[in-house]
Image: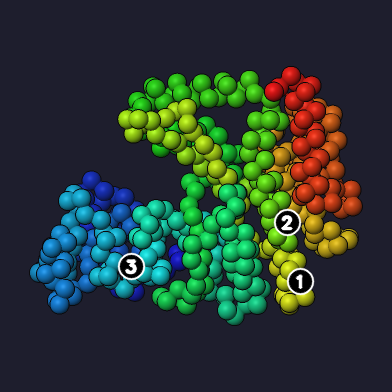
Amino acid sequence: MAASFLTLSNLFLNVPFDEKDDAKSRGARWDNKNKLWYAPTGLDPLEFRDWWAFLNPVYKDKETLKKKGAKWIPEIKKWIVPAGKDLDFDNFTKWWPKDLKQYIFSDRFVCHKLFAKSGQSIVFKAWDLSEDVWCAVKLFHPNIGSSPVSEEAFEREVNALEKLEGHENILEIIDYGKHEGSDRWYTVTGWLDFTLDEIFGDEEMVFRKLIRNMRPDLSRDEEDEVIRDILENMDDDDPWFYAYDTLEPILDGLVYAFGHEIIHRDLKPSNIFFDYYSGRDENDEVDKEDVEGIIKLADFGASKNWELEGKKKVTVANFYSAPWTPDPHAPNEMLFQNTWDVFSWGVIAIALVTEEVPETYEDTKRLLDTKFKEEVGENLHTYLSRTVSLVPDERPSDVRQLHKDITKLNKDRRKALGIE
């Protein structure tokens, strides 16, 4: 991924001896005079986040820095936050070098890792210093403010997230504004560890990460046993209802948005976030029986807000992602935007049931008529054929109708399978 910011001068690093090869592979160099590693000018400081340690030489705050645990290094005339003393470098942001302050937003959100990059923005995993929780900082590309389309995407994102605030399946917005260091627009939202497309990449890997988060005490053999149990139990589940555990909250979020006159228009696995939260027993240990999944929809930059219809002068419909969204250039598609989220949900449903990611519409149709039909039978196959039809008036009219129809199909399916 391309760098978001660059070092403007050499950045000293506190690299342990056994990590020097890692630092060197990322571009760090050795300063023989000062006996320190440094990131030279022109590199991304975030690539060296694990070794940030040096502060600006602020004389007037020297007593404060001493009390907080920092140490003065006279040879290079800099303060260092020593490693191994239970000190958090993030607690010293006031004295960070200019190169590092590029990664601070609103004097509160401190970036730790570049998580994703898209045509509109880059996303960081960041720490909220006020609430002591992880969050996501989305930094829009520099053409925001000069490109009307990009500006529109930012405004639609903020408008949608503010309007839909409070629903459990919509990613909450915490803050937004213009970054002082780069003059670029940004939003801050809650953090979830996974996106839906990671399930398609390696479902076992996702389960393993979740188990490690919830049960760090398990040995590797115990972890393997838990994973085997999970995968074996999955084989016993009805494939449709197993997938619907994920599909239902997605649909609930879409229905809520539609009720507030908002259509997502670019729904895909990479902007559907999920995680699992576990309860605690009386000994404050993870309760394996009290594990709750959560799914949230994000990335509303291409959304349609009917309440603002006529006030917007720039279209962002071309931000769609094939094969998850219908091609807006196809005949009559712009007249059936209410069905676009229906279409997207249908393609995601097919991908989840078949455990295969379509790359084209032809892939979607092939999966629908083969593996999907084999797994779920005629009734759902017939209905999903309508949701992903390229003839827009064949689709359910909107997500509310989709929800109504699917509820009826699920009721009939449970009855046929003898499921309570």
Reading the chain from its start, which is encountered first: label 3 or label 2? Answer: 3
Whole-angstrom CA distance, mark 3 to mark 2, is 41 Å
- Mark 3 secondary-structure assignment: helix
Q: Which residue is mark 1?
A: 309
Reading the chain from its start, which is encountered first: label 1 or label 2? Answer: 2
The one nearer the camera, 157 or 364, is: 157
Residue 148 percent coordinates (x, y): 65, 77
The residue located at (62%, 67%) in the rendering is: 159
- The reply to whether discs 3 and 1 touch (Cβ–Cβ < 8 Å) is no
Q: Report crowding for label 2: few under 14, some 14 to 19, many 20 or more residues within 10 A (C-alpha).
A: many
The residue located at (76%, 43%) in the rendering is: 403
Nearest to viewer (mark 3 / mark 2):
2
Q: Report crowding for label 3: few under 14, some 14 to 19, many 20 or more residues within 10 A (C-alpha).
A: many
Question: Which labelled disc corresponds to residue 414?
Answer: none
The one nearer the camera, 32 or 57, is: 57
In which quadrant of the rendered image does the C terminus lie? Answer: top right
- Mark 1 secondary-structure assignment: loop
The residue located at (80%, 57%) in the rendering is: 338
Q: Which residue is mark 3?
A: 100
- The reply to whether discs 1 and 2 touch (Cβ–Cβ < 8 Å) is no
Residue 239 percent coordinates (x, y): 69, 28
Q: Which residue is mark 2?
A: 258
Q: Residue type at mark 2: give it.
A: Phe
Reading the chain from its start, which is encountered first: label 3 or label 1? Answer: 3
Nearest to viewer (mark 3 / mark 1):
1
On screen, 262 above or below 353? below
User: Could you say which quadrant of the image residue 246 lies in?
Assistant: top right
The one nearer the camera, 190 or 85, is: 190
Q: Residue type at mark 3: give it.
A: Leu
